[in-house]
Amino acid sequence: MTENKRPLIFVSNDDGITAKGISHLVNLMQQLGDVLVVAPNSPQSGMGHAITINDPLRYYKSNIWGEEVEAYECSGTPADCVKLAKNYLNEGRVPDLVVSGINHGSNASVSVLYSGTMSAAIEASIEGLPSIGFSLCDYSHDADFSHTDDFILEICRNVLEKGLPEGITLNVNFPPKSEEEIKGIKYCRQSVAKWQEAFDQRQDPYNREYLWLTGKFVCEDKGEGTDIHAIDNNYVSVVPVTYDMTAYKALKEIEENWSSKG
């Protein structure tokens, strides 16, 4: 943490700068440090780690949070927003923490690969910055985030004070608001699951056919140490993830089994 200064915290998301979730997160981060927001000017859910390379990248000052928070809306993706904040808009000051979210909807299990929320956090990790992605398992635009506050502050304070291993970001998912209080935090592995796609064939007003991607989430991983199990049992799930996608066990097996014996 920066000595004798309030920490600098970058905030982004994938639901867009006007989403309720990012406003909730910005308000919480103001309790911990100085806040710089760079977020998409429109929803970018499911963008994964896309970046803008064939179109202009535009940004505009935003006054959503008044003069106390420096904020910008960006025409690019969540990963673009972090790149812009880190390498152009921060005036050379290295952030102490990058947070993304709070996402409207789960980013547990394999969803981490599709998530713009998590890609913003992972981009920060690639840039060498400690980062966290926060998601609520409620897709409503007017979701209730109030039960997440204490846990978000606790997790962020731990990262600010103790740091994270190099190349690691945290994928944090909250169960939806209910009459039962959250039981606590579980540190988990990612569930083995997938999205089972379906394509809904429709017609536009000109009677031209088009497809709309639909589907359902399928999880047959019944392990008790998973993020899905934690969320289903009213715990906050915290999964450390990394952008290094090397399958080290398979690497060793392939090297041993496929190498020439000559």
Image: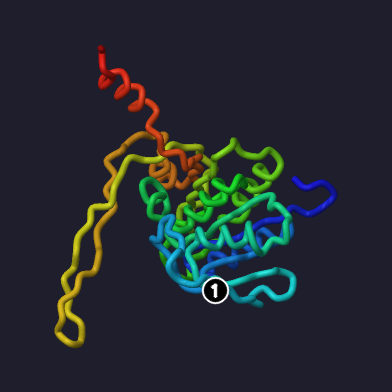
Q: Amino acid at mark 1?
A: Arg
**Quadrant (top left/top right/bottom left/bottom right) for the N terminus:** top right
Q: Residue at x 41, y 39 (%)?
A: 245
Residue 178 visible from this viewpoint? no
**What residue is shown with label 1?**
58
Q: Quadrant of residue 88?
A: bottom right
**Quadrant (top left/top right/bottom left/bottom right) for the C terminus:** top left
- Label 1: how many residues lie within 10 Å, few (<14), some (14-19) or many (20+)? few
Q: What is the basis of the colouring in this image?
A: rainbow
Q: Nearer the viewer, residue 73 or 262?
A: 262
Q: Position of residue 130 (x, y in %)?
A: 61, 46
Q: Measured along the vertical axis of the image, is residue 139 above or below residue 172?
A: below
Q: Position of residue 259 (x, y in %)?
A: 28, 19
The single residue placed furthest to the front in the displayed view is 262
Q: Measured along the vertical axis of the image, is residue 90 above or below residue 194?
A: below
Q: Residue at x 48, y 60 (%)?
A: 103
Q: Nearer the viewer, residue 232 or 24?
A: 24
The single residue placed furthest to the top in the displayed view is 262
76 relative to 163 in the view: left or right: left
Q: Residue at x 49, y 72 (%)?
A: 56
156 relative to 3 in the view: left or right: left
- How many numbered badges does the structure rendering display? 1
Q: Residue at x 50, y 40 (%)?
A: 240
Q: Quadrant of residue 198?
A: bottom left
31 relative to 134 in the view: left or right: right
Q: Position of residue 111 (x, y in %)?
A: 38, 51
Secondary structure of residue under mark 1 = loop
Residue 148 visible from this viewpoint? yes
Q: Nearer the viewer, residue 254 or 124?
A: 254
The single residue placed furthest to the right in the displayed view is 4
199 relative to 87 in the view: left or right: left
Q: Position of residue 133 (x, y in %)?
A: 53, 52
